[in-house]
């Protein structure tokens, strides 16, 4: 009687669920890869940040960035001592390490290079990598746990994804019009 030349899908419920599971697995894998790639790019950027400065300036710059992300912005009128003090108030467990770093940083900036107080002459500059190794994970953890980050990061990510989607739709519409 009637010729049905079109193809019809006669998937069983089990086949549909298996296909859906594969698609979900691919989506989850893509998200994991995106996160790993983002972490790799962030790691490269973070290591190269301030690379043309001495070690103490690199660490101070990174502390300033982390503190700013955690809602403690650097004011132009603040000295390194005042700024580190405001960070130490927010992260009291790290106060001794922060003050030790601040002391070395300020003396490296302002002490005469010929002075016996200069960190290069006292050997304290060699302590900086160990101080940073102690501070960095704790400051990152403080940033991640900070309410400002917890509220803005998902919001910014969502807005970025929506902008990307809108650009793709506009590009597709333009291509279809041509």
Image: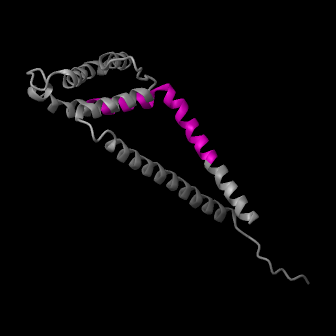
Quadrant in the rendering for residue 132: top left
Residue at 69% across / 55% down in the picture?
A: 169
Query: Who is closer to the viewer here, 138 or 11?
Result: 138
Q: Which quarter shows the N terminus? A: bottom right
Q: Is residue 94 above or below residue 127?
A: above
Q: Which quarter shows the C terminus? A: bottom right
Residue 100 part of the magenta segment: no
Residue at 56% across / 41% down in the picture?
A: 157
Colouring method of the image: one colour
- Residue 129, image x, y percentages: 21, 34
Q: How many marks?
A: 0
- Residue 171, image x, y percentages: 67, 58
State the predominant SS element of the stretch in magenta: helix
Q: Farthest right residue?
A: 1
Quadrant in the rendering for residue 158: top right
- Residue 36, image x, y percentages: 43, 50
Residue extent of the magenta highlight: 134-163
Left or right, 136 with respect to 166, comes to left
Left or right, 163 with respect to 107, comes to right
- Residue 19, image x, y percentages: 62, 63
Residue at 28% across / 34% down in the picture?
A: 58
Quadrant in the rendering for residue 94: top left
Residue 157 part of the magenta segment: yes
Query: Who is closer to the viewer here, 145 or 175?
Result: 175
Q: Is residue 97 above or below residue 9?
A: above
Residue at 13% across / 24% down in the picture?
A: 118
Query: Who is closer to the viewer here, 144 or 88?
Result: 88
Left or right, 145 with respect to 121, comes to right
């Amino acid at each position: 009687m009637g010729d049905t030349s079109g193809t019809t899908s006669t998937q069983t419920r089990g086949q549909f669920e298996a296909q859906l599971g594969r698609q979900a697995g691919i989506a989850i894998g893509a998200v994991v890869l995106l996160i790993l790639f983002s972490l790799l790019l962030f790691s490269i950027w973070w290591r190269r940040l301030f690379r043309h400065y001495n070690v103490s300036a690199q660490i101070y710059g990174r502390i300033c960035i982390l503190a700013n992300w955690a809602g403690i912005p650097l004011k132009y009128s603040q000295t390194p001592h005042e700024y580190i003090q405001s960070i130490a108030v927010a992260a009291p467990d790290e106060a001794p390490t922060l003050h030790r770093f601040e002391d070395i940083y300020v003396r490296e900036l302002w002490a005469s290079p010929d002075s016996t107080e200069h960190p290069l002459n006292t050997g304290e500059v060699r302590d900086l990598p160990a101080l940073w190794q102690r501070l960095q994970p704790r400051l990152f953890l403080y940033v991640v746990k900070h309410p400002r980050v917890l509220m803005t990061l998902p919001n910014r990510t969502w807005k970025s994804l929506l902008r990307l989607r809108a650009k793709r739709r506009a590009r597709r519409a333009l291509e279809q019009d041509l």
